[in-house]
């Protein structure tokens, strides 16, 4: 039996501090704007008359802040987001607030109050994040930790994971080793504190609150007698998978096995939320079609006028349990997109038409999939559905690839908002890691979070490494004769891309 160390997701101190701070900032900025504009006498009466509008604006701001990624820890490559994101997101939130409130005469805010509060929220939200960074530099939010490893490569993996996340909030005191590999072989980035036999004393001497663990399954059995007393004394134990969930929000394929997946299945809440997901799917898809049908009609006319071929195409995709179904989308590629055979679709695909580019950018091409959701073939949130030929071949080379078929495919999903295009073997495996994260942590609140963040990707676009820079796997290119991301249907469906 493999010992698996994991924990359920927790609200981090960073998330709690910033969320609570933003609630206070937005509420106080609204109050300050009222009193600065109207004075204390008239301001008090104004608050009584317009409390509904003020509360509504606070809610709108918080939703946009969350959807805009204001509480996501930026990676080192996106460190500047922490400085510029408040400007962009606050401007979007102010615009949405103005549109929503001014669209209803009974729920209006004065233009002066709206403008003053927007400026105050922008300045204070930026100041709050600078304060957070200052407090982190002083060690306020940091948790003391040690690394416990049985091989130099495992230690290097842990260090790399911590280094890639600029907001891990762990202060690593040093490295503790176990096993037969000599200490001299381990990375020199951290001081060597000792061995697992002296773990209890090291925890006490360095005031450690977290053990970051990366050992082989066999070694984990040997460590139980050392780790169990520490856990009961309040020390948290996190393995590499749990740390990756917290910092990168994905499940590393190289560190899991069938037993780990079985443990996840035993603790999964998918059965409890399935009915809730179905109710939300029906409600949102019906509302979406009310707005989406006119957009489809206009888009269909533009497609017909600018590019020969059908407006809507059908394509076989793999659904829950590996069962195939027919997916509907608006055509965004040229009719001869796959004249020389199916190829990978990418972020900068030259086969996409001028109209198709904007349909993809704003996700309008996916509106017909709401009919698939109504039929129960898809859900709003889930792994991206792929073509049967594509999944069969990928499953041969990517471990646990078929796990994504344990739940319904989705119109959007965790992998789609974090890593939208899979143009290589490595990219497809990376997307699976995000899909496994979603399957493990599936919940109603996570679905709501993904839907909100999907609006962010539509409004501002997803900023990630361009797939054109990813290495392409030659073996995969030879085997994959069908495209899982292109919108070109196979000839048997009688359609064109």
Image: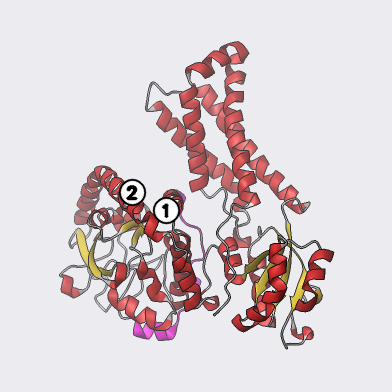
Looking at the rendering, the stretch of residues picked out in magenta corresponds to 456-480
**Residue 292 lies in the magenta stretch:** no
The quarter in which the C terminus is drawn is bottom left
The quarter in which the N terminus is drawn is bottom right
Q: Residue at x 59, y 24 (%)?
A: 31
Residue 467 visible, this angle: no
- Would you call the spot at circle 1 few (<14 residues within 10 Å), some (14-19), or many (20 or more)? many
Q: Residue at x 62, y 81 (%)?
A: 216
The residue beneath circle 2 is 280
Residue 193 visible, this angle: yes
| Residue 312 in picture, x, y percent from top left | 20, 59
Task: State if disc 1 and disc 2 touch (CB < 8 Å).
Answer: yes
| Residue 136 in picture, x, y percent from top left | 73, 52
The residue beneath circle 1 is 447
Q: Residue at x 50, y 72 (%)?
A: 469
Q: Residue at x 54, y 23 (%)?
A: 113
Query: Mark 1: which secondary structure?
Result: helix
Count of labels shown? 2
Query: Mark 2: which secondary structure?
Result: helix
């Amino acid at each position: 039996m493999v010992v698996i160390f994991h924990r359920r997701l927790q609200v981090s101190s960073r998330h709690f501090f910033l969320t609570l701070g933003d609630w206070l900032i937005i509420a106080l900025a609204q109050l300050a704007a009222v009193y600065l504009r109207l004075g204390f006498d008239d301001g008090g009466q104004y608050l009584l008359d317009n409390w509904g509008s003020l509360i509504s604006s606070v809610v709108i701001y918080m939703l946009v802040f969350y959807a805009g990624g204001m509480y996501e820890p930026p990676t080192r490559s996106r460190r500047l987001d922490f400085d510029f994101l408040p400007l962009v997101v606050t401007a979007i939130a102010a615009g949405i607030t103005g549109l929503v409130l001014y669209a209803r005469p009974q729920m209006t805010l004065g233009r002066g109050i709206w403008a003053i509060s927007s400026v105050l929220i922008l300045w204070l939200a930026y100041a709050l994040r600078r304060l957070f960074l200052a407090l982190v530099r002083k060690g306020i939010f940091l948790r003391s930790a040690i690394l416990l490893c049985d091989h130099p490569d495992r230690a290097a993996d842990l260090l790399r994971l911590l280094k890639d996340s600029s907001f891990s909030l762990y202060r690593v005191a040093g490295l503790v080793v176990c096993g037969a590999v000599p200490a001299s072989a381990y990375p020199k980035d951290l001081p060597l504190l000792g061995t697992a036999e002296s773990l209890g004393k090291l925890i006490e001497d360095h005031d450690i609150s977290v053990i970051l663990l990366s050992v082989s399954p066999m070694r984990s059995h040997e460590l139980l007698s050392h780790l169990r007393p520490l856990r009961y004394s309040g020390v948290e134990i996190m393995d590499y998978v749990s740390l990756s969930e917290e910092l990168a929000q994905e499940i590393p394929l190289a560190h899991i096995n069938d037993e780990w997946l079985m443990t996840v299945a035993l603790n999964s809440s998918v059965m409890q939320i399935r009915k809730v997901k179905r109710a939300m799917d029906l409600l949102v898809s019906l509302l979406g079609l009310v707005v989406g049908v006119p957009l489809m009609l206009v888009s269909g006319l533009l497609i017909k006028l600018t590019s020969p071929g059908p407006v809507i195409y059908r394509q076989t995709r793999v659904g829950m349990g590996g069962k195939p179904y027919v997916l509907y989308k608006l055509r965004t590629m040229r009719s001869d997109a796959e004249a020389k055979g199916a190829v990978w679709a990418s972020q900068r695909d030259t086969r996409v038409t001028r109209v198709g580019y904007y349909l993809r950018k704003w996700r309008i091409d996916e509106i017909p999939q709401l009919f698939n959701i109504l039929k129960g073939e898809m859900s709003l949130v889930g792994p991206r559905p792929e073509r049967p030929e594509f999944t069969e071949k990928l499953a041969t080379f990517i471990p646990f690839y078929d796990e994504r078929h344990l739940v319904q495919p989705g119109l959007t999903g965790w992998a789609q908002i974090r890593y939208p295009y899979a143009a290589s073997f490595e990219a497809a495996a990376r997307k699976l890691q995000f899909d496994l994260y979603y399957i493990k942590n599936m919940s109603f609140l996570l679905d709501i979070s993904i839907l909100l963040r999907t609006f962010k990707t539509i409004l501002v676009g997803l900023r990630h490494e361009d797939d054109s820079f990813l290495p392409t796997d030659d073996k995969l290119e030879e085997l994959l004769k069908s495209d899982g991301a292109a919108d070109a249907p196979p000839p048997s469906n009688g359609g064109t891309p």
